[in-house]
Structures are given as C-alpha cells and as structure tokens.
C-alpha cells in the first residue's frame, strides 16, 4: 500500500510541475554523429570573429569536429565548418559563420561559435 501511495504522490507532483507554464529546459546533446564525423559540444567557449576592425571576441559554446575513422587534415576546414553548422542546427542552436576555426590536429575546433 505504501508504494502505491508513493506513486500517487509522484504523479501528483509531476502534474503540478506541468502546470507551472515553464517550458522544460533542453540540454543539447554533448556529441552527435554526422556521417563519418562526430561533433562534441562544450559550454562556455570564447572565440574570435574577423571584422573590418580586426578580431573581436565572441562567446558561446565550443564545437569540436573530428572523424574517428579518417583523421581530419588542415585543408579540411571548410568540410569541418559545414559539419559544425549542421551540428549546431541539430541541437536547435545557431552557428556563427564568421567564427574562426582552429586546427588542433586531428580536430577542427570552433570556440564560441554555437549559440
């Protein structure tokens, strides 16, 4: 009888929580696969964008792109950026296309680029 009472209390509390009108927070997936590439999201990154006035800091989540089967090379930055754009979109976030990517062999890292 006690376990049934506990279930009722939990169901009531869950129903009350649903009535607050607040949308549940959605935590983005820390890693996603996109074909042969994997994207890893880390919080609180500070990166740079290049503007007419020079480099300016940006804040957001840092996205790292790598391939477990075929390591990325320096000349694959555009491929990595396209994967990063899709990865941010899949997480319901926005990728800053002006963010400067950093090649950290065998990864491409986009600090602060995903918001």
Image (cartoon, rainbow, N blue to C red):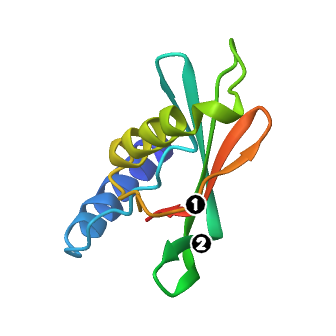
Look at the numbered disc 1 and give the secondary structure of its residue: loop
**Residue appearing at x 62%, y 63% in the figure:** 43
Q: Quadrant of residue 68?
A: top right
Give the number of marks. Answer: 2
State the image quarter where residue 13 is shown: bottom left
Residue 90 at x, y = what percent?
A: 35, 41
Mark 2 and mark 1 lie on one chain; the one further toward the N terminus is 2
The relative height of residue 49 versus residue 110 in the rendered view (above or below) is below
Label 2: few (<14), some (14–19) or many (≥20) C-alpha neighbours in 10 Å: some
Which residue lies most toward the right here?
Answer: 105
Disc 1: which residue: 100
Query: In the displayed structure, would residue 23 be above or below residue 68?
Result: below
Question: Looking at the figure, which quarter contains the C terminus?
Answer: bottom left
Residue at screen point 71% across, 37% down:
107
| Mark 2 vs mark 1, CA separation in Å | 6 Å
Establish if 110 lies above or below 55.
Answer: above
- Residue linked to disc 2: 48
* For the residues bearing labels 2 and 1, Cβ distance under 8 angstroms: yes
């Amino acid at each position: 009888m006690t376990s049934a009472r506990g279930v009722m209390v939990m169901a009531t509390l869950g129903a009350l929580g649903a009535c607050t009108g607040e949308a549940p927070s959605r935590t983005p997936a820390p890693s996603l696969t996109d074909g042969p590439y994997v994207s890893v999201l880390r919080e609180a990154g500070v990166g740079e964008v290049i503007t007419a006035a020079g480099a300016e800091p940006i804040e957001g989540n840092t996205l790292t792109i790598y391939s477990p089967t075929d390591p990325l090379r320096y000349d694959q930055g555009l491929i990595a950026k396209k994967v990063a754009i899709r990865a941010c979109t899949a997480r319901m976030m926005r990728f800053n296309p002006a963010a400067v990517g950093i090649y950290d062999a065998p990864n491409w890292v986009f600090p602060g680029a995903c918001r």
